[in-house]
Image (spheres, rainbow, N blue to C red):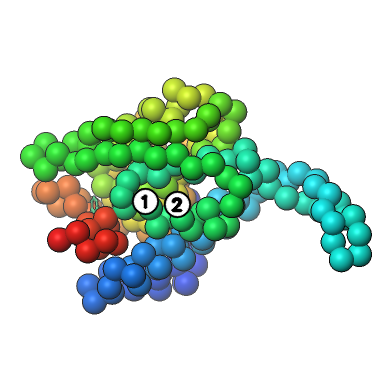
């Protein structure tokens, strides 16, 4: 199911991202803030465990998410600010890395590196800011599914209707939390209006 955030604060931050004058530091910071909003939304019904902690008044049974049952998987390099942001909220979660490159002629994504921790029975948070054709998400999801997680949630900043349809049709059971669904893809498979290349903008790779 696709969950598009509707909060005015989300829309405001997306507008900030679209502004070409936003430098790399502020761009990454805004991506990180939006990621936190996506996590809050995605975790609204997440199960809680009891954990005893030593407080200033002694032992207390408190509620907590089982952070260690969560694996945050990022697609390099544009997903890095999102990964850092999730790990700030869930510091005991595990991180996994996928590296893909986009073939600029075919516009297909090519997976050339993966380093995933044990995913069996875990909740996977796949973080990737842009869902353009959906190709890289499908490749990532295929690999993640082969590792037998119990649940997969994706956190995305901007998506095209075409790309999201592709992902939704291939993996209807997955929850997709996204800040903004844009208008379309252009002939080079960039999202319109989109942000341009999120990896380049995050790290000044131009
Ligand atoms: N990747 C991006 O960073 N931006 C797009 O518009 C499409 C793919």
Question: Which element carries disc 2, helix, strand or loop?
Answer: helix
On the image, the x and y values in percent for residue 99 come to 30, 39
Looking at the image, which residue is at 91% across and 64% down?
A: 57
Disc tally is: 2
Q: Can you say whether 85 is above or below 175 in the image? A: below
Quarter location, residue 11: bottom left
Q: Tag on residue 91?
A: none
Q: Give the label on residue 79, or none.
A: 1
Q: Are marks 2 and 1 in contact (CB under 8 Å)?
A: yes
Residue topped by disc 2: 83
The secondary element bearing badge 1 is classed as loop
Q: Where is residue 80 in the image (x, y as percent from the top left)?
A: 38, 53
Q: Quadrant of residue 107?
A: top left
Say few, some or many: other residues with alpha carbon within 10 Å of mark 1 (under 14 / 14 to 19 / 20 or more): many
Residue 199 to residue 12: above or below:
above
Residue 50 is at least partly visible in this image: yes
Q: Nearer the viewer, residue 115 or 14?
A: 115
User: Which sits in the foreground, 30 or 114?
Assistant: 114
The residue located at (19%, 59%) in the rendering is 205
Residue shown at 58% from the left, 33% from the top: 122
């Amino acid at each position: 199911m696709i969950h598009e955030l509707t909060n005015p604060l989300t829309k405001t931050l997306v507008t900030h991202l679209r502004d070409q004058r936003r430098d790399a530091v502020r761009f990454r910071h805004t991506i990180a803030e939006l990621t936190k909003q996506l996590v809050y939304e995605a975790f609204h019904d997440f199960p809680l465990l009891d954990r005893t902690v030593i407080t200033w008044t002694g032992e207390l049974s408190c509620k907590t998410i089982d952070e260690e049952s969560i694996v945050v998987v990022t697609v390099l390099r544009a997903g890095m600010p999102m990964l850092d942001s999730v790990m700030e909220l869930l510091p005991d979660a595990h991180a996994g890395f996928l590296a893909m490159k986009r073939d600029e002629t075919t516009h297909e994504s090519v997976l050339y590196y993966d380093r995933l921790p044990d995913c069996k029975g875990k909740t996977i948070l796949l973080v990737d800011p842009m869902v353009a054709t959906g190709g890289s998400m499908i490749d990532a999801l295929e690999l993640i599914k082969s590792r037998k997680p119990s649940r997969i949630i994706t956190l995305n900043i901007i998506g095209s209707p075409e790309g999201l349809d592709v992902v939704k049709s291939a993996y209807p059971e997955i929850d997709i939390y996204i800040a903004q669904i844009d208008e379309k893809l252009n002939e080079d498979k960039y999202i319109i209006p989109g942000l341009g290349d999120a990896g380049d903008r995050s790290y000044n790779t131009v």
